[in-house]
Amino acid sequence: MDYSISVRNLSKRYKLGETHRETTFREALVNLFKRTGKKPAEIIWALRDVSFDVKDAEVLGIIGRNGAGKSTLLKLLSKITYATTGEIAVKGRISSLLEVGTGFHQELSGRENIYLSGSILGMKKREIDERFEDIVDFADVRTFLDTPIKRYSTGMRLRLGFAVAAHLDPDVLLVDEVLAVGDAGFQKKCLNAMRDMRSTGRTVLFVSHNMAAVENLCHRAIWIDSGRIREDGEARDVIKSYLSTFTESQKAGFDLEKIQSRRGSGDIRYTGIEFLRPDGTPSQLITTGDRFVVRLYYRARDKVLNPHFGLQISTEYGTLVTELSTWLSGFDIPVIEPGEGHIDLEIASLNLMPSLYFVSLWIEGVGPIHYDVLEHCASIDVTPADFYGAGREMSSRFGLIAVPCEWRFDHSRGSRQLS
Amino acid sequence: MGEATALTATKRKTSRASRAWALEFWHYRELFFFLVWRDVKIRYKQTLLGALWAIIQPFFTMLVFTLFFGTLAKIPTEGIPYQLFSYCALVPWTYFATTLSFAGNSLVSNQELITKVYFPRVAVPASAVLSGLVDFAISSLVLIGMMIWFRVLPSWELILWPFLVIPLVILALGVALFLSSLNVKYRDVKYVLPFVTQFWLFLTPIIYPTSLIPERFQFLMYLNPMAGIIDAFRDSFLPTRHVNWTALGISFGISMIVLVLGSLYFKRTEREFADIV
């Protein structure tokens, strides 16, 4: 069997705070004299002892929580950064697509950026010349070709960036979460382009949080957890066991204090989440159409001005169903003094079809500054209920949301009026 | 014996590594070309005067220098009008000084590229160094106008002018490689740079002629590679002067050493760029 990627015992170590440590001569000097009192740098292993092979023309999905080491792995494979120990062998030309629109310069025109980005991503000028028309058609920006891209809309810029990337011709392609941006139409276009790449026999490594996309594109998946490979096998199986770690059965509350995988400054943090009945008692069961209260406990370390609290509900496969936030609702909290407290969110009617949903939480401030971001930190297992009062059970096969509605019928009015 | 073989082995290994480095750069030459092209294109984007800035900088410096050092301080210039005397040195100097600050910050200002895609990192400072040559060429053209204005006939040595760019670029690249990689870790470089160029300006015969320095100290002056290079530019432009090949040779040699040291430092640190930039 021919392998196009072979990774052996790969490890990558970061010294925590290395980016901020001794970034001026002064600090370096001060530290020189403080040697004795200096505490040893905290060491983080972003990857630890990772080994795997990828066959020619295989499409491999890489999944795992934020900060598990997926992106580090791609950066090591694409030589952007170097491994602490271990070996990587890659056969053929490698292109990495870690963002959409790599190398774009705001001041340059669309035409100029196609050449710039294309060459940065590894295309020869001759190749860009040949594919130029296709790229322009794919991006659908022909009328704006000579306009600086700073005048482009976000959507246009994304399309142009992806158009260039979709016309790369590498032997090995590394893709990181490009599907996370853009609207549904754009995502569909990306997925189709990736499917085309697969059919041309290229080796693709695909990092994504979108489990549906991974399952759809990849036969095999690797689940990385805290820098190590937790599972390697059929995509469907790996995804299933990955998702199962997010949930036990429905709980009335989740302790958020001990969760390590969070981002943000931490000036104010979530410490817990509870689901309550309108009367304030814990709710063990949440059904379609329920009225209930989500209670979010926090602890503020410092005085926090104008914080906004938010909650996202997404499906098992990572599709965002809705985001509820104090900002969106226009609910302002001018100040939170240091200490603890809670904020309540009353949901009048949870119009979700029965299924398992994940809850992500965030607190943001003006700037915007992220105080605390917790992904998939709680789950809601919506139990079937008789939503329409017809004695029929709702189920996930009817879709994601249940819309309150009413049917009417009037035979005597006769045929439809077409105007 | 064993030690000797080990030594040759290491030598062979380093020379092979250097060759691989050069080969890889060659492989990415088109990307390098595009980076230079980008740096030239964006230089004066959204400015009113555009490429005129290439001329304004050395020209107005020349006017100020002429007033203070020529007319007021009466620095001897071997009978040459001070305007001519200073401008022909300010053209290469302006290139050198702006290149140092532009290229010195280049890795930091391109950090988005460096953390998102692989290519030989040296392409970033190198393209910054080369893109400044467009400005150099534009400001050199003004010299023709000044020759007409002051009715000066150039000597044959004027054809050396474009070739003197070679040691100038070598030196600028050497210093830029060192500064840009140092800047990745220590942002002090940004603050130190204006000082360095300021001092360097006074250590180089731009405001004054080399002949102003007592003869027995002149060798010290030529330890500064810019001295020999700037002098050579001036010698090639002014018909009354002739290129001092020894001084130029020394400067060229020192510039090469600076380039080699700069490359070595750059090569040693470049693996970490994406992690700490």
Image (cartoon, helix red, strand yellow):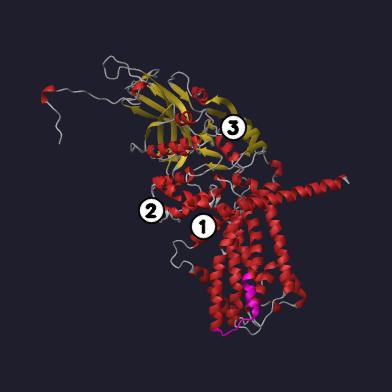
| Disc 2 to disc 3, C-alpha distance | 41 Å
Confirm or deny contact between disc 2 and disc 1 (CB under 8 A).
no
Question: What amino acid type is highlighted by mark number 1?
Answer: Arg
Q: Which is more toward the observer, A232 or B226? A: A232
Report the number of discs.
3
Residue matched to label 2: A144
Q: Residue at the location (58% across, 71% down)?
A: B91
The answer to whether residue B232 is seen in the rendering is yes
- The magenta segment is B149-162
- Residue B188 lies, with reference to residue A236, above or below; the image says below
Q: Chain of mark 2?
A: A
Along the polypeptide, which appears first: circle 2 or circle 3?
A: 3
The label number, if any, that marks residue B38 in the structure image: 1
- Locate residue B2, reporting x and y percent: 87, 44
| Disc 1 to disc 3, C-alpha distance | 37 Å
Q: Residue at the location (32% across, 23% down)?
A: A291
Check disc 1: other Cα within 10 Å, few if <14, some if 14-19, many if 20+: many
| Disc 2 to disc 1, C-alpha distance | 19 Å
The answer to whether residue A301 is seen in the rendering is no
- Locate residue B174, reporting x and y percent: 66, 59
Check disc 3: other Cα within 10 Å, few if <14, some if 14-19, many if 20+: some
Q: Which is more toward the observer, A233 or B187? A: A233
Question: What amino acid type is highlighted by mark number 3?
Answer: Val
Residue matched to label 3: A54
Whether residue A111 sits left or right of residue B177 in the image: it is left
